[in-house]
Image (spheres, coloured by chain):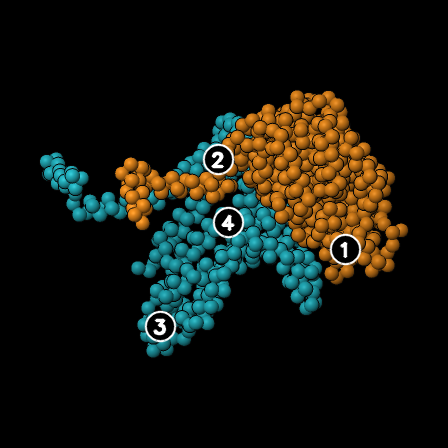
Chain colours: A orange, B cyan
Amino acid sequence: MTNQTKAGASIHRLGPSRRTVLVGAAAGATTLGFPYISRSYAAESLKFWQFYAPGGGVATQSKWFEDMVKSWNDSHDVKVELVYVPNNAYMDGTKLPTAFASGAGPDLFIISPGDFLRYYNGGVLLDLTPFMEEKAREDFFPGVIANRMVDNKIYGLPMEVEPMAMYYSVDAFNEAGLTEKDIPKTWEELLTVGKKLTNDKRFGVLFETAPGYYQNFTWYPFLWEGGGDIQTKEGKSAFNSPAAVQALKFWQDAVNMGVSPRKPLGGGGWDVVPNLASGYCAMQNVGIWAISQLREGAPNFKYGVFKLPTPPGGKYATVGGGWAFVANAKGKNPKAAGEFCAWALGSMSPDSIERVVDWCTKAKSDMPPRKSALEQGKDAYNKGFLKVFADDIYPGARAEPRVPPPVYKAISDAIQACQLNGQKPEEAAAAASQQIDAFLAGYKGAPIL
Amino acid sequence: MVNDALRSDASAIPAARKAAGFRLSNRQREWIAGYLFVAPDALGLLIFVGAPMLLSLSLGFFSVSGFGAYSFVGLANYRRMLADPLFWQSLRVTVLYIVMLVPALYASGLGLALLIQADTRFNGFVRTLLFMPQTVSLVVVALVWQVLLIDKIGVLNRFTSAVGLGSVSWLGDPHFALIAVVVVSIWFLMGFYMLIFLGGLQDIPKEYYEAAKIDGAGPVASFYLITLPLLRPTSFFVLLVSTVTAVCGSQTFDLVYVMTRGGPANTTSLAIFYVYQQAFLFNEYGYAAAMASVLVVVLMLITVLLFMLTRGGRFTYE
């Protein structure tokens, strides 16, 4: 007691005032006790925004990100810090564009081809070519890297290729007396089989119905299968075509016949567990990622996969989307951010190739964007559903188009008007084409692919 | 030592004031005190509402290409608005939404308040239940209603199918989607308006009803001759606030974003949602700001009109 009094007296006389001690203690507690706050002040680290949060849908995916960042941080002075943004706030949300508009964009982030031009034309994407060796640049499949390139420079390194396909419920097929022989090969057969699978609690086949980049992405193969396209080689709209009308009508028929729902369950048409596995639909138009979704979310669900059916006289096609690492050209350390992207996904080092293989075969279920990764992971692509994708589905894949927002919106409005609002496909295609042409006449950004 | 210094300072101030002939009257002191009390709020309003509004208004005269390159375009954004069919479509949807939502909120708020105005324990419990949606996140509200309204297997569709009405895609059919958004908005908001009406009802002296009863007036006559006239200021407040809420309340964005994304075929694309799309999906910040400015002007006009028609909410009643 005496000692305490003495110590207290000595503090009062010689040391800092009580207020200073309290302020110091509060600052110390803030810094030491709240790691997240103290970390936010550690301005040196590069912030990497993405949506694979710990505890998210598939645990292996967030672990892949964590392992990658740990591996980089263990061997580099400039550290990388993962920042999770909820999926909805990321894909169509305000967080990323607002951050860039206010000059506070992340150093590293991921984007899909559908959003590439918005960020490239906005001048925030860093040229990653100088950070990659020639051999690594050539290791990417040309069709996959093309829509991340402008003027032969690489602005994004794809993590994956995600071709679209049709998934079906084996139990629903059995219940309707259908077998593998009944798997549809044409659009007409898809609707006929879909009709047989439809009952008072279940839809036959599900296509995405929510307007947005994703719906356009899933619809493009149907346009291509009939020989259609968005743009001519001369840079004019190619949308007012029989192929576009046919594809718009196909989705319209599916809804009008009562075979397709107007509203999917869960997160939407990309979400396979609440739709296909729950029994809401018997067939679903979804991408390769659904394999890992079902593996994690519905391990006992019996399903099959088949490639997209074709229209009369058409040629099979699918779309290969996928996300890519990109670096902020206006970030606090673009050089380190570029090095990170190349180190992670674009180097010829065994670790870099293995990382791509792990992401595509273990963390997720995707096709690899690199030749070396396809070779190194060939065991995984020689069995199960990945083999179906590798052998049957992926060979018809075309890269996801990169289009500026006004073009995307014109196409989206045409799909929505036909699919859900009964507009004549001819009128919708003509109106969209007119809007696209009006926009293209004054467009000065990077080429639309 | 310190005390002495303070004492001498304190005595110095009135002396100095006297010397300068500076003395505040009670009225002036009250006036200063009043403004000092209001100052923190006014400052907050100025910084967080006034300044952004001015910036937004200015942004409407610029074209923003990419992320942060501004160029002055004068009235180009406003001219573009006139020729943009999707802008007019979003205004049409907003007007429809207002026309359905505002009267429904008025009727449901007043109706519920009348039903549970008696101060009993049971009514207290019911009031809590009715107000509860207000305490839930709008995203959660939207997700729950999305499941309830889903095609074929949703609770509502099971009911309609059971009674032979068949199944309806409440959120996927352009004929029903906006109605569904309105219904969910009413469910979410009516508890708040019920509370406002309850406050208004409790302000009406009970003696008026007793006197009317003695004079032979029934409940309907009492409602039309006493309740409604004396609720005029409350009604004015409810109409004004619910109209503003229908144009730019948080539910106009959150519910639409989660339940329909503006679809099907833009039939639930309210003006606020279209502004959001232009700003954050298409990077058209200048155009979005111009549209937001137009919405503010429209809201101000509605407010002025309401004030003029009702003499500031007093109507003819003094």
Distance of mark 3 from mark 1, alpha carbons? Answer: 68 Å
Q: Chain of mark 4?
A: B
Q: Are both tags, 3 and 4, on one chain?
A: yes
Name the front one of labels 3 and 2: 2
Q: What residue do we see at 70% from left, 37% from top?
A: A322
A185 or A360, which is in the foreground? A360
A310 or A28, which is in the foreground? A28
Q: Considering the numbered disc 4 on the image, is that residue within a helix, a strand or a loop? A: helix
Quarter location, residue A144: top right
Residue position for label 4: B250
Residue position for label 3: B209
Q: Is residue B94 shown above or below A240?
A: below
Quarter location, residue A373: top right
Distance of mark 3 from mark 4, alpha carbons? Answer: 39 Å
Q: Chain of mark 3?
A: B
Q: Considering the numbered disc 3 on the image, is that residue within a helix, a strand or a loop? A: helix
Distance of mark 4 from mark 2, alpha carbons? Answer: 32 Å
Residue position for label 2: A41
